[in-house]
């Protein structure tokens, strides 16, 4: 039987790139998303579920559906995330904070909670959580996002320790600035908050990396496939940045 992977927020962006990369390798793919239209555009060979990763009941039902259809799960890519507010901490509302941490951190927790029993039962599995370089350095004017992504790393480290005796590995990928619509939204908000142009903010991100470049979604996908593979069978509890080596966590022109 081919491997089975669940990818949250897998209908577009980084998640879609991961789903395509796993599918190309012969893995059975199940993706979730809150965008029903994007799910309809996924290949017919993929399983799809429209669910909010922060909805405990919905995620529990997803777990039951996976177990009924597949009888287990080999790989979890907890990929769902939102940018959250871009503002000084004193201007961030509690609702804004909670909305951001719900998707980025609660969603990763609920996905791991869904996957762990199935992986324990089979004595093997790989969990790949999506954190961020903001989870390594902090991020001015993005306090909810940075806090959630630091939390994802703490969750991953704990999962690696807790689940390792059952043959389950856990790692976190920290993307840098990734080309695509979501990053364009970040650039626009930061430009407005800092009184800069979009191109000035873009240049600040690129010049803040050793490789002077943004990352492509396919770069993140390739790392996820590696971490889920037998080639990484002794890689667990690791925080791996795919970011062109971020030098400056506070991009400036």
Image (cartoon, rainbow, N blue to C red):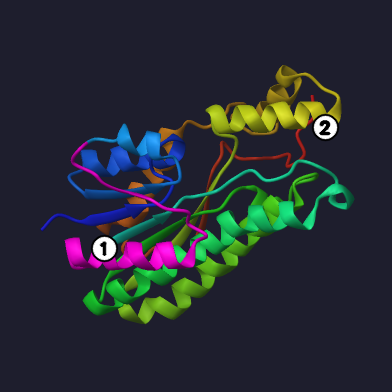
Mark 2 against mark 1, which lies toward the viewer? 1
Front residue (pair 177, 67): 67
Callout 2: SS:
helix
User: In what quadrant of the picture does the C terminus appear?
Assistant: top right
Q: Give the class, few, some or many, for how many residues have Cα within 10 Å of label 1's Cα (few <14, many ≥20).
A: few
Front residue (pair 66, 134): 66
Q: CA distance from mark 2 to mark 1?
A: 43 Å
How far across and how far down the image is residue 109, in percent? Answer: 50, 67
How far across and how far down the image is residue 194, in percent? Answer: 84, 30
Q: Residue at x 59, y 40 (%)?
A: 176
Contact? badges 2 and 1 (CB < 8 Å): no
- State whether residue 47 appears in this view: yes
Q: Residue at x 86, y 48 (%)?
A: 91
The residue carrying mark 2 is 193
- Residue 72 placement, left or right of 176: left
Q: Disc 2 or 1, which lies upstream in sequence? A: 1
Q: Give the class, few, some or many, for how many residues have Cα within 10 Å of label 2's Cα (few <14, many ≥20).
A: few
Label drawn at residue 23? none
Label drawn at residue 65? 1
- State whether residue 17 appears in this view: no
Magenta highlight on residue 206: no
User: Where does the magenta region start and end?
Assistant: 44-73
- The image quarter containing residue 214 is top right
User: In what quadrant of the picture does the N terminus appear?
Assistant: bottom left
- Residue 236 placement, left or right of 243: left
- The image quarter containing residue 60 is bottom left
């Amino acid at each position: 039987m081919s491997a089975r992977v669940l990818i949250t927020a897998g209908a577009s962006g980084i998640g879609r790139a991961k789903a395509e990369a796993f599918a190309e390798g012969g893995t059975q793919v199940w993706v979730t998303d809150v965008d029903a239209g994007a799910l309809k555009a996924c290949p017919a060979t993929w399983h799809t579920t429209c669910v909010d990763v922060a909805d405990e009941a919905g995620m529990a039902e997803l777990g039951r559906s996976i177990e009924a259809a597949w009888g287990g799960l080999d790989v979890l890519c907890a990929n769902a995330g939102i940018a959250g507010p871009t503002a000084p901490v004193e201007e961030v509302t509690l609702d804004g904070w909670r909305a951001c941490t719900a998707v980025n951190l609660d969603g990763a927790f609920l996905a791991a909670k869904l996957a762990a029993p199935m992986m324990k039962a089979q004595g093997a599995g790989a969990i790949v959580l999506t954190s961020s370089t903001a989870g390594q350095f902090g991020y001015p004017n993005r306090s909810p996002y940075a806090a959630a992504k630091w939390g994802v790393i703490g969750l991953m480290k704990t999962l690696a320790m807790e689940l390792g005796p059952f043959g389950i590995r856990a790692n976190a990928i920290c993307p840098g600035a990734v080309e695509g619509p979501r990053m364009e939204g970040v650039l626009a908000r930061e430009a407005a908050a800092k009184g800069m142009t979009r191109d000035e903010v873009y240049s600040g991100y690129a010049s803040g990396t050793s490789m002077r470049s943004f990352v492509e979604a396919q770069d993140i996908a390739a790392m996820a496939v590696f971490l889920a593979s037998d080639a990484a069978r002794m890689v667990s509890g690791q925080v791996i940045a795919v970011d062109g080596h971020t030098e400056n966590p506070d991009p400036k022109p």
